[in-house]
Amino acid sequence: MKMRAARMYGYHEPLRLETIPVADVGPEEVRIKVGGAGMCRTDYQLIEGYFRAALPLEFPATPGHEVAGWVAGVGKNVPRSAGLVEGDQVVVSGGWGDGSCRQCHGGDEQVCAHGRWVGFGPHGGYAEYLPVHYRYLIKIPSQPGLSPDVLAPLTDAGVTPYRGIKKLVAAGAVGPGRTLAVIGAGGLGVYAVQYAKLLGAGATVVALARSDEKLAVAKTNGADHVVNTRGRSAAEVGEQLRRLTGRAELDAIIDCVGAEDSVQMGFALLATQGAFVSVGLVGNRIDIPLFPFVGREFSFFGSFWGNYNDLSEVMALAQEGRIKHTVKRVKFEDINTNIAALGQGELVGRAVIVFD
């Protein structure tokens, strides 16, 4: 049995579009027929070597960590209690821990020091078929509006800001009379705006980005106000916030960009005892003034991906029709063109590879 796959044979090289044998399925694994594979800027960074020191790859490697599809085969030792049979629609929870560390025992397998991530070593969704251990699958009932090409982005772009905003909620940074800002209105930001409205307990939600087109999507997805930050200083953005909200400061921020300048602007706008959560990974370092950080009691959180329970909660919201989707479907032969567009920040919403 053969399948199409887009594979890396080295860094800084286009993916090779190939036809290769379908991988064998282990006794506790399930073969997934990929119906949608989200294209993340992280995939572009993987190809360009951003993760090379921390996650050296063995080539050929198949990227793709946002995966949804259907069960196409079940290993002989997959228990009946897993409830998985051929034809079931599923999504893949991408953080695969070793099962023995404190993080794994607490459910946060995506931050296991000895774990693996689908598409970052284990072969990912840029191929038509994929073996996955049954423990990392979530079954999703088929219903209108929830096909795999829509579900796939929720496994990263959809769950990452969800986990981040949950941290802002736990920090007590949102609520009536508070302002919550989403920095960036790309693949993550369009979901972050929605979760800000769903979880923000009445907070005013503002989207900050450099593209009017992306900000228009953020507005459609529920942002109360949008601000184009291109060419503007933090002081100028603050004045615009004052005109829109009555205040020049922000009580809570989720940064879906993760560039040095986005972090610096966010902290320059943060109110006393405000909370900032980083989920984006465009840059490599942050540089913020220390005294305001301490003297104004700012809180800063790193938030990485999401765990199985986070993803289950996101899928429940999706099944209730409470999440809007902005998806561009990409044909297999157009993968490299869209990888380049990801690197340039040209895509609006989420690009998703479809094989059918």
Image (tube, rainbow, N blue to C red):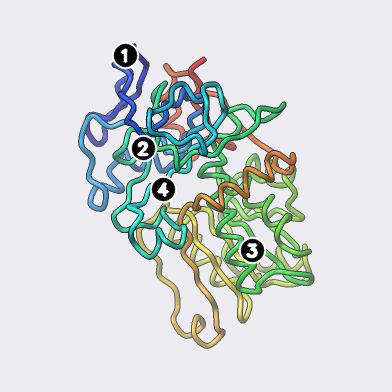
Under tag 4, what secondary structure?
A: strand
Q: CA distance from mark 2 to mark 3?
A: 38 Å
Q: Mark 1 touching mark 4, by CB under 8 A?
A: no
Under tag 3, what secondary structure?
A: helix
Q: Mark 2 touching mark 4, by CB under 8 A?
A: no
Q: Quadrant of the N terminus?
A: top left
Tell me the quarter of the picture where residue 79 sits. top left
Position in image of residue 7 (x %, y %)? 30, 26
Under tag 2, what secondary structure?
A: loop
Q: Mark 1 touching mark 3, by CB under 8 A?
A: no
Q: CA distance from mark 2 to mark 4?
A: 10 Å
Could you tell me how many numbered marks the image carries? 4
The residue identified by callout 4 is: 95
Vertically, is 252 above or below 50?
below
In the rendered structure, find residue 237 and report the number of the disc placed on it. Answer: 3
Position in image of residue 244 (x %, y %)? 77, 62
In the rendered structure, find residue 19 and report the number of the disc placed on it. Answer: 1
Of 99 and 262, nearer the camera is 99
Q: Amino acid at mark 4?
A: Gly
Q: CA distance from mark 1 to mark 4?
A: 27 Å
Number of other residues with Cα within 10 Å of mark 4, as a class: few under 14, some 14 to 19, many 20 or more? many
Q: CA distance from mark 3 to mark 4?
A: 37 Å
**223 displayed left or right of 257:** right
Position in image of residue 332 (x %, y %)? 44, 19
Q: CA distance from mark 1 to mark 3?
A: 50 Å
Give the number of the mark in front: 2 or 4. Answer: 4
Vertically, is 328 above or below 229?
above
Which residue appears at 59% of the width and 47% of the height?
A: 312
Sooner in the amino-acid sequence: mark 3 or mark 4: 4
Position in image of residue 326 (x %, y %)? 64, 35
Q: Mark 3 touching mark 4, by CB under 8 A?
A: no
Of 49 and 121, nearer the camera is 121
